[in-house]
Every structure is written in C-alpha cells, then in structure tokens.
Image: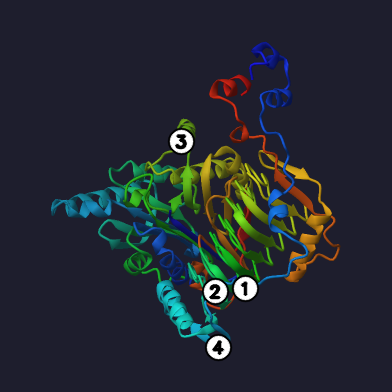
Amino acid sequence: MASVTDAELKEMTQEERVKALGMTTEQLTGKSLYIEFDPDAEERFTYPWAPDVDFNKRTELDCDGLTTTEVNAKVRDLMNEGYGTVVLQNPRGMHSLGVGILNKLNLIIEGSTGYFAVGLIDGPNVRINGRVGWSCGENMMSGTVMIEKNAGSTFGAAMRGGDLVCRGSVGSRTGIDQKGGTIIVGGDTGALSGFMMQRGRMVVCGNAGKNLGDSMYDGTIYVGGEIKSLGVDAVTAELTDLDKAWLTRKLKQYGMMPDKGVDHFTKVVAGKMLWNYDNLEPNEKKLIL
Amino acid sequence: MCGIAGLIHKGKSSNVGGEMTAMLQALKHRGPDSTGYAVYGEADDGDYIMRLKVAEAEDMNRGRGIHQVLDERIAAVEAILEENGAKVKSKDRVRPYALRYVISHDGDTGEMAEHIEETEGVEILSLGNGLELIKDLGDAADVAGAYGLNDFTGTHGIGHTRMATESDVDIKSAHPYWAFPYNDVSVVHNGQITNYWIMRREMERKGHRFMSNCDSELLAVYTAHNLANGVSLEDSLRRSIKEIDGVFTYLVCTKDQLGMAKDTMAAKPLVLYESDDLIAMASEEVAIRAILPHEIDTTDPYDEEVRVWQA
C-alpha cells in the first residue's frame, strides 16, 4: 500500500479508495451454485449413510397426551424396529417434534407443530400437513422437509444441507446464518431474510420484507415478487441460464413452478464490500472508514 | 421470555375466562413467575367494576399485624369512594389483599382513582364498565382458581405469563397493565423497551403516574396518553412502533376492541388465528390449540404490523 499516499486516498471516492487499498471488490454471482449444482447430474433424494429401514413398513403414533420427549423417543424406537414410515397424529402445536433424526425415514406429521420442528436432522424426508412455528429445520443437515401451510420466523436458521420447503408464507429472518442447502418458500418472507447467510440457496416465490440478505457472506437468494429493500452489502445480480435451470428443476420437483416461469425472479448475492472482506491493517481501515 | 395471549369473539359472548386460562396454562413454560388476565364482560346499568390490591402477596408474611393494616387501607378506600359520591353495590374480598367492587358513580372516575391511590399500599388494577383485571403470582390454574375466573363470560380478553427480567416478581410488576386512569384499557407485552426511562420521564412530565419499574407499564401509560388525546387505538399502535425503541410484541384491549403491534425487527413472536367469529393470538401456537384442538390455519404477523379487531 506504500504506493498510495494519505493525501491521494483522501481525494478518492470510497470505491476508488477500497480498490487502491486492495480490498476485495469482486461481486459474487452465487458462487456456491457453480460449486454444488451440476445440471447434468441425477436427481438424488436419499443419502448413502442412512440406515436401512423399510419405507413400506408403516405405523402411526398419536401424540395426544405424550410429551415431546416421549414422542421423539418413540420415533427412535420405531426406527430401530425397522419402520420406515411413521405418521404422527394430533401434534397440536407441540415443540421440537422430530428433532435430531439422523436416519433415512419417511416422517409424516398430520397437523401443526410448534417451535424447532425437525431441527438437526440428517436424512429423513418429512411432510408436515400443517403449519410450523419458529426455527423449523434449524441446523438441518440433509433430507427434505415439506410444509403444507405457513411457517414462523427463523425458518431454516443455520441449515447446512437438504431441502426445506414451505408452500405458504414464512416469518422473519428466514435462513438466518444459512450455511448450505435450499430453502424454498411458496409465499412471502419477512424482514431480514438471509441475514448473515453464508452458503446455500433460498427461493422466495412471493415478496420479501425489508433488509433482504443483510450482511450475507455468500449464497444466493432468488425472489419472484417484490423486495421491500436490500440489506447492507446485498446486491442484485444477473439471472443466468444456470440459475434458471436450477430454479426450474427445484420448483418443478416440489410442484411449485409459477405459471409464468422463472425468468422474472430477482437474484440477490453478497456484494462483499463489508469490512470483514478487506485485507487492510487497522490504521488503514481508520483512514477510509 | 414471557408469553402473551389474546382472543376476541365477534358479536357474541363466550367463556373467555376458561379459554384464557387454557391458553395461558399452555404458555406456562414461557413465564412461571406470575399470570395475569384482562377480561371483558358487561357491567349492569353502567356500573363500574374496580379491581384493586391493598398489598403485595409477599406482604402477607409480615406477621399478624398486616391484617389490621389491610383493614385500615380498605376502610380508607371505602371512605374515599363515599367522599366521591360512589355507591358500593357489591364488594368481594377475593384474597386478603385483593378486592373487587361494583360501584355506581356519576362523577369523574379518573379523579376518584387518583384519590384512592393516594392511600399507601393501594393500587387500582382496573376500573371500567367491562374490564376486570386480575394478576397474581403463580400459573394460570392457580390464579384462575383463586379468583374464580374459569366461568367468566365475556367477549374478549388478553393474558400474560411473566418471566421477570426487568423488575421484581410481584403483583405490581405483573401484566396486564391498566392504562390508568383511562377506563377499560389494558395492555400485555412481550419484549424489552430500550428507551423506557426517556419515555417514562416524558410521560411523567405530562402528568402520568407509574406504579412499577417494569418497562411494560410504559406501553399502558403511552396508550392511555394517546387515547386521552383523541388518538385512535390503531393510530396509537402505529405511533408506538416509531416512538418506542426495543423489541416488542404487545396487545391492547379496549371495551370493544383488541389490537396488536409488532416492532420493526419482528423479534418477538406472535401466532395469529382468524375466523369469522373468533380471533385468537398467542406467543406460541400451542396456546391457540389449547382452545381449538382441531386443525387450523395460522399466520405470523410481520414486522411493524398493526391490527385491530372489533368485538
């Protein structure tokens, strides 16, 4: 940085200054898409490390009168008995149902759940025929979760893999700290969705609230409707053919393809202009900030 | 953390006491310290219902002399009622420190309320034609049982389960708060108000009184101030989002309305159920499902969302 004097820096615009000081100014266009998605690859719904349970072996469990701990323990017992399809009846807003399932399993929840439904899962395919409360799919690692109604806030917080799908609308801070995987929302999402998103993809077919993608590090957000406002360091980027191919595949997979296709989606990525992307020394930072 | 709940029946009365108890008991895990109700029935012939406490629950452990102190306070309250021309039609000492009066009064109830609260240890919990505000230590089953709320019939109500974070575990810091001295207005709140002291001093300069150091009381005083100045409930809720800092979701009831407001960050939860004849909302769906066990459609209100429903 010795070639640039303080006096010269003071005369520069902010953009010229950060470039002269060697800050990263590359605008990402959904890097994780290129790393993770191969349009020619076969579709994959199960995971090789899942234990062998028989999907045709089906049973039902009535949650009425049971605690969350009892329900979750019973589901584990049923998996150990080889049941590959478990239906939970009468959940009535219970919290933390189906958390920590690390096996291949068809889990069907006939009704609505409370907070933290199916968090920390690694492998199961879950269908929830109701609504979910806050933090559904938090930290989920793989599998698919399909919610038929609406979802609460922090939907898919810190999720790392798999597909988390809500046909209805979701609350605020969707995909906060998302580290991977795919979140798909059929309706709208609230404020600060994609806040501090790190990797992965989020698709919102409806509208997005204010501060979308605030402080996102990486990852890609696609929005089919209006965006109330972009957050700090979130920028729009060109929707490429690869993006369209991926969107088409994912939305068709879950029967959520909009009538007008995917060309109208807005793509949002990290601008990578925040201080944590620079390589400046503290004194240099003071000069430009 | 705290849990809040509210419900309003459109155009009919129901067992809101029992319904609110079921909802609040389902939220017990969000706040085990105290439980409070503001439920709305119908007083006869324009009578006023006054709920008050003459001591804190813990004061009852201060020896035998406390009973005489309480009797003296009650006598002082009744003397003030008489001085102000209020006629006591019924009196119910629900607990040694908690009373319910039905009174007829033609004058200024606000002025009378201020006189009553000049009595040491006395706080009016609510005053109005329809509002009955009950709050005490313990869970919903305890409070409903002690105060006979399970059979209360009315049109709407709000409730609160408190986990004390900003002030003591006592009745004066429990919710709901009555919007003193504005009849029939009550508030419950989940969150933290970060400009509490600035706003409190502003309200105190305008002549409003605070009975506790609980930040939630500010919302009641703020609402009372707005309503007294002709602001509609909906506009007051909207203003609060701009003027009050912090993270909050709160519910307000008037004699025939129920309103909600959510802060700009949408940081505190609320789940909402709407049908043609019933609106129910709570911090968690599990509370709504306590009164509606069949499958229902619910939504989460978004940031800065304000709604008002009519009974």
Confirm or deny contact between disc 4 and disc 1 (CB under 8 A): no
Number of on-image labels: 4
Residue found at the far top of this picture: A7
In what quadrant of the picture does the C terminus of chain A appear?
top right
Residue assigned mark 4: A57
Residue assigned mark 1: A46
Q: Are marks 3 and 1 on the same chain?
A: no
- Tell us which disc is closer to us: 4 or 2: 2
Name the residue at 21% across, 54% down: B60
- Tell us which disc is closer to us: 4 or 1: 1
Q: Secondary structure at mark 1?
A: loop
Q: Amino acid at mark 2?
A: Ala
In what quadrant of the picture does the N terminus of chain A appear?
top right
- Within 10 Å of disc 2 (Cα), the crowding (few <14, some 14-19, many 20+) is some
Q: Earlier in the sequence, mark 4 or mark 1?
A: 1
Q: Chain of mark 3?
A: B
Q: Which disc is residue A50 wearing?
A: 2
Q: Amino acid at mark 3?
A: Arg
Q: CA distance from mark 2 to mark 3?
A: 58 Å
Q: CA distance from mark 3 to mark 1?
A: 58 Å
Q: Is residue B290 above or below residue A238?
A: below
Asked where in the image residue B149 lies, by quadrant, the reply is bottom left
Residue assigned mark 3: B200
Q: Secondary structure at mark 2?
A: loop
The answer to which of B181 and B299 lies nearer the viewer is: B299
Q: Secondary structure at mark 4?
A: strand
- Tell us which disc is closer to us: 2 or 3: 2
Confirm or deny contact between disc 2 and disc 1 (CB under 8 A): yes
